[in-house]
Amino acid sequence: EIVMTQSPATLSVSPGERATLSCRASQSVSSDLAWYQQKPGQAPRLLIYDASTRATGIPARFSGSGSGTEFILTISSLQSEDLAVYFCQHYKNWPRTFGQGTKVEI
Amino acid sequence: EVQLVESGGGLVQPGGSLRLSCEASGFTFSSHAMSWVRQAQGKGLEWVSTISGSGGSRYNADSVKGRFTTSRDNSKNTLYLEMNSLRVEDTAVYYCAGSPGPYYDIGGYIYWGQGTLVTVSS
């Protein structure tokens, strides 16, 4: 099983600042990685797939990078509505696994 | 508009059974692999199972293997999760989720339901 480790657990960022979230895989997942945003009381929403491709309707301030075992989700200019928990997930092999999440506080 | 609506959650005793349903609309259901993802209160996301668009291929997490069965009825645009031998640790919100293509969940989960709560307790 591939273990996904996210850091930091909590990130405090002021509006307008850049937020950088990390995700590390215990073995290579190539670019088979997705990022999700989950706001309180809501279902997750796909932000990024294939490590760096924005999903439909996702604002350009969200970007993903990385391959292999190291991945980054960047929110270039944080907005108040970006308060959420962010999860990474691989789909390289079975079982699929998620990181434990990074909570972004404004 | 794409919609996934789960139902069937509730309170069940340990060792009991429950069947979840997820009714899809707004997209060609059979063209998309579907998955179940669960989330215990205050915890992270856990992948449970995936079924291909045709229903011919299925994968389950080890934690539910032999107890949970995922199926689909493409004529009814509905995904199912049959849960048997339920344990306290199965308590969670269960989400159904759809992927971009028919084969597996390559590309992640683009469609999500609102979730249904399953509570396993005596």
Image: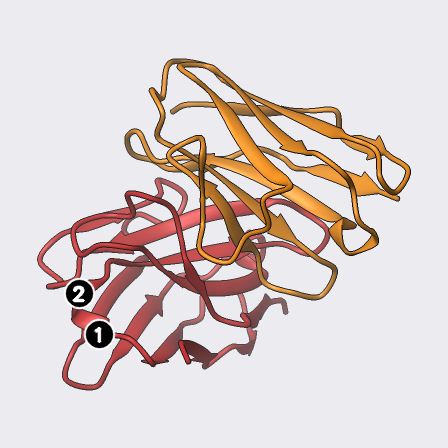
Chain colours: A orange, B red
Chain assignment, label 1: B
* Residue position for label 1: B28
x, y (%) of residue B82?
32, 69
Chain assignment, label 2: B
Q: CA distance from mark 2 to mark 1?
A: 6 Å
Q: Which mark is residue B107?
A: none
**Disc 2, disc 1: CB below 8 Å?**
yes
x, y (%) of residue A42?
65, 65
> Tag 2, which secondary structure?
helix
> Tag 1, which secondary structure?
loop
Q: Do tags 2 and 1 sit on the same chain? A: yes
x, y (%) of residue A72?
58, 24
Which residue appears at 67% of the width and 47% of the height? B43
Question: Quick check: B68 left or right of B75?
Answer: right
Question: Quick check: A27 left or right of A83?
Answer: left
Image quadrant occupied by the N terminus of chain A: top left
Depth order, front residue of B121/B112: B112
Number of numbered discs on residues: 2
Badge 1 local density, few (<14 within 10 Å), some, or many (20+)? few
Depth order, front residue of B2/B44: B2
* Residue position for label 2: B31
Which residue appears at 58% of the width and 54% of the height? B39
x, y (%) of residue A24?
54, 18
Tell me if residue B1 comes above or below residue B84 in the rendering: below
Badge 2 local density, few (<14 within 10 Å), some, or many (20+)? some
